DNA sequence: TAGATTGTTAATCGATTAACAATC
DNA sequence: TAGATTGTTAATCGATTAACAATC
């Protein structure tokens, strides 16, 4: 409880949550670190270490209560925060997120989308209104979203990122294949990247390796 | 050269490639580990260690030749392999990849797409033909793709993954929010995941942290 | 030659695993 | 009580950083 949690642990939390949530859905009440380790392909030791970062809530001789564990992880991740998020760029990828992604289960409430293309402006995608990108700053002033999702072409990403940060956005979910850190030096903003390209190149390496 | 390269290093290679490729595009011939470290936010020491995993090709007193470095990283990643890839599921996300992603620059050649929806079957998206998913096995027998991209609903992912592996596919680029490892136990296949959900939860955690 | 920067070894740091006493 | 499993400390392992001789 309150202990420092390393990024290595944080990165594992969502995966823990997925497995625990699945057990929860199956009405399983209790699981030992050994069992969970087997399912997840980790060591029991690591699981106990990880869970103990945020306070021991297992029971000796018994294991972990699944419902309790699930709540704790959700709390630590902040999944009930309901941070307001806006999405920039309603192309194929933007559409994919708007249509198929459960933001509310992951701590966010998607409140608006923006694009520059007239054919989208004024429409609504899965219940989210699409506004003219020109209205972005005005919208932010009024609604104060905490997070912005960048599904725009990479060429416009840096400027947009700076603008959003100036508007008070505190987190960026970046899908453009660019490191925004350079453009946001000494800005107080969290950038989480989804770099398709890096991921695919890693796959390429790994396949090349296995064929040696 | 031929040294064992740890996964920590491999994960950094695509990012190195991006930066080096950018320098290359700017006709910069030479860069020192110190300069590159500054640009990338790493230590010079780490960069030299990383590059030395696959053989020293810097020049003492001078630095690294950008063109040379770029070639070496591309070679190590296997970016000129041209592995045949097929895409499963032509929804918004599938469309996004088909329309906007330069597979050929990342070691792959996208040769076909599959869906079960009649409205896509027979069409062509950005030059790639969409086939009936029923024809998958037949297609694989003839064309032997090395990699499959899973942009399908998560419910069908495990079975599809097993089927593809049986067809000889050696790599999966998995966009479904599921760990396929369980379904592919002792199968000789590389799975590279792009877990949107995990990424967003990590962002949620990091924002929650900064607001403390 | 003098200055710069690599390649590489050694030191440090952090993360994972092992071990076991505590305790349910 | 006996068996099981946690919480936690200690040991190990691996990755990063620092230092410096080699050398361009």
Image: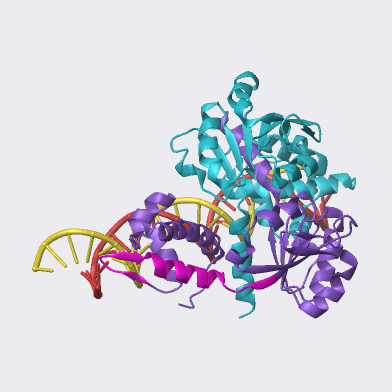
Chain colours: A cyan, B purple, C yellow, D red
Horizontal and vertical percent position of residue B51 = 43, 67
At 41% across and 57% down in the image, what residue appears? B23
Side (left or right) of A7 relative to C7: right
Q: Is residue A59 visible?
A: no
Horizontal and vertical percent position of residue B49 = 41, 65
Front position in the image: B129 or B60: B129
Residue at the outermost top position: A142
User: Does residue B50 lie above or below A55 as drawn?
Assistant: below
Image quadrant where residue A140 sits: top right
At 57% across and 31% down in the image, what residue appears? A170
Front position in the image: A141 or B27: B27
Image quadrant where residue B31 sits: bottom left
The magenta segment: B57-84
Horizontal and vertical percent position of residue A143 = 65, 21
At 81% across and 57% down in the image, what residue appears? B89
Residue at the outermost front position: A118
Side (left or right) of D16 relative to A1: left
Front position in the image: B42 or A187: A187
Front position in the image: B92 or A80: B92
- Whether B78 is among the magenta residues is yes
């Amino acid at each position: 409880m309150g202990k420092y949690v390393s990024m290595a642990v944080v990165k594992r939390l969502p995966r823990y949550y997925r497995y625990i949530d699945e057990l929860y859905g199956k009405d399983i009440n209790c699981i030992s670190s050994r069992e969970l380790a087997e399912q997840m392909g980790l060591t029991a030791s690591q699981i106990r270490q990880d869970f103990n970062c945020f306070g021991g809530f297992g029971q000796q001789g018994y294991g972990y209560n699944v419902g309790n564990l699930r709540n704790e992880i959700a709390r630590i991740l902040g999944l009930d925060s309901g941070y307001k998020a806006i999405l920039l760029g309603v192309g194929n990828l933007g559409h994919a997120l708007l249509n198929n992604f459960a933001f509310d289960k992951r701590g966010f409430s998607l409140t608006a989308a923006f694009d520059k293309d007239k054919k989208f402006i004024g429409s609504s995608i899965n219940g989210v209104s699409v506004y003219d990108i020109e209205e972005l700053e005005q919208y932010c002033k009024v609604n104060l979203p905490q997070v912005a999702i960048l599904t725009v072409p990479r060429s416009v990403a840096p400027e947009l990122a700076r603008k959003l940060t100036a508007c008070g956005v505190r987190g960026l979910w970046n899908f453009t294949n660019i490191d925004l850190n350079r453009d946001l030096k000494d800005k107080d903003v969290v950038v989480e990247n989804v770099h398709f390209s890096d991921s695919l190149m890693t796959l390429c390496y790994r396949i090349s390796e296995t064929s040696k």
